[in-house]
């Protein structure tokens, strides 16, 4: 009697499970549940992946000291270039007093200031994403080579002439000092510091990565 009532209550066209006697849900409901489960799993996977990527990004080294070194180098190039562009004729006259460069190279002096500004602009990219990339390393190598070339140039200038005329780094601006030979000493010291900063920028990130791997 109960089986008869149950069979009358369910829809006549709805199939039943042979084992349990319960009605089988329509195919559309099964597919909908499957799609909901698949969507839920996809969302959960995407959330876990984003969380993992954020954790990896937060764990990346910032290379703070290397970037600070690049900032100081960049500011040096920009300030020196701006000082020369502001009064390029004065810079050319100072270099002419040094009597080191041959006459056929003196026309290139007009491009020294703009070249220093371009170098400063390239170092802006090195501060950011290019620090560990080949382009950033190439820019730092060129910058360091230019500093080394300037140190060699200063060594060729007569000390007396250098003391009276200045090096022309900041055009005609110089720091007043009563120390004999102070101009050469100060330029050597400042440019050696710049070389050290280049080494920090070039090799500092690799040392940080090495310590992280060993740790």
Image (spheres, grey):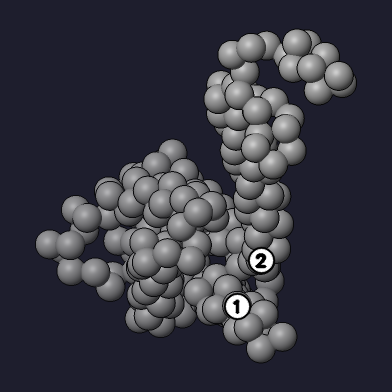
The residue at 47%/51% (across/down) is: 125
Q: Against 118, is 25 above or below?
A: above
In three-dimensional space, the C-alpha distance between marks 2 and 1, rounded to whole angstroms, equals 8 Å
Q: Against 167, is 188 above or below?
A: below
Q: Against 148, is 81 above or below?
A: above
The one nearer the camera, 104 or 73, is 73
Q: Against 90, is 21 above or below?
A: above
Label 1 belongs to which residue? 209
Q: Can residue 187 be seen in this view?
A: no
Q: Residue furthest bottom?
A: 214
Marks 2/1 in contact by CB < 8 Å: the verdict is yes
Q: Quadrant of the C terminus?
A: bottom right
Q: Is mark 1 on a helix, strand or loop?
A: helix
Count of marks, rendered view: 2
Q: Residue furthest left?
A: 104
Picture coordinates of residue 55 (x, y %)? 71, 57
Picture coordinates of residue 191 (x, y %)? 53, 73
The one nearer the camera, 212 or 65, is 212
Q: In which quarter of the image is residue 205?
A: bottom right
The residue at 39%/42% (across/down) is: 85
The residue at 66%/88% (across/down) is: 214
Picture coordinates of residue 156 (x, y %)? 35, 81
Numbered tag placed on residue 121 in the rendering:
none
Q: Is residue 135 visible?
A: yes
Q: What element carries label 2?
A: loop
Q: Looking at the image, is mark 2 or mark 1 earlier in the sequence?
A: 2
Picture coordinates of residue 162 (x, y %)? 46, 71
Label 2 belongs to which residue? 61
The one nearer the camera, 49 or 102, is 49
The residue at 75%/11% (across/down) is: 8
Counting other residues with Cα less than 10 Å from the Cα at mark 2, is it few (<14), some (14-19), or many (20 or more)?
few
Q: In which quarter of the image is the N terminus?
A: top right
């Amino acid at each position: 009697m109960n089986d008869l009532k149950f069979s009358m209550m369910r829809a006549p066209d709805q199939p039943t499970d042979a084992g349990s006697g319960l009605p089988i849900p329509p195919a559309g409901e099964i597919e909908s549940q499957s799609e909901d489960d698949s969507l839920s799993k996809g969302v959960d996977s995407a959330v876990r992946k984003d969380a993992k990527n954020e954790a990896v990004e937060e764990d990346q080294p910032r290379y703070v000291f290397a970037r600070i070194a690049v900032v100081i180098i960049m500011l040096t190039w920009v300030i020196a270039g701006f000082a020369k562009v502001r009064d390029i004729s004065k810079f050319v006259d100072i270099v002419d007093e040094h009597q080191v460069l041959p006459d056929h190279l003196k026309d290139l002096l007009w491009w020294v200031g703009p070249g220093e500004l371009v170098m400063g602009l390239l170092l802006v990219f090195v501060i950011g994403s290019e620090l560990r990339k080949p382009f950033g390393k190439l820019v730092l190598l060129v910058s360091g080579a230019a500093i080394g070339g300037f140190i060699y140039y200063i060594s060729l200038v007569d000390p007396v002439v250098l003391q009276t005329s200045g090096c022309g780094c900041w055009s005609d601006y110089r720091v007043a000092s009563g120390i004999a030979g102070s101009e050469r000493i100060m330029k050597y010291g400042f440019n050696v510091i710049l070389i050290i900063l280049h080494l920090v920028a070039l090799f500092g990130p690799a040392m940080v990565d090495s310590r992280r791997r060993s740790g």
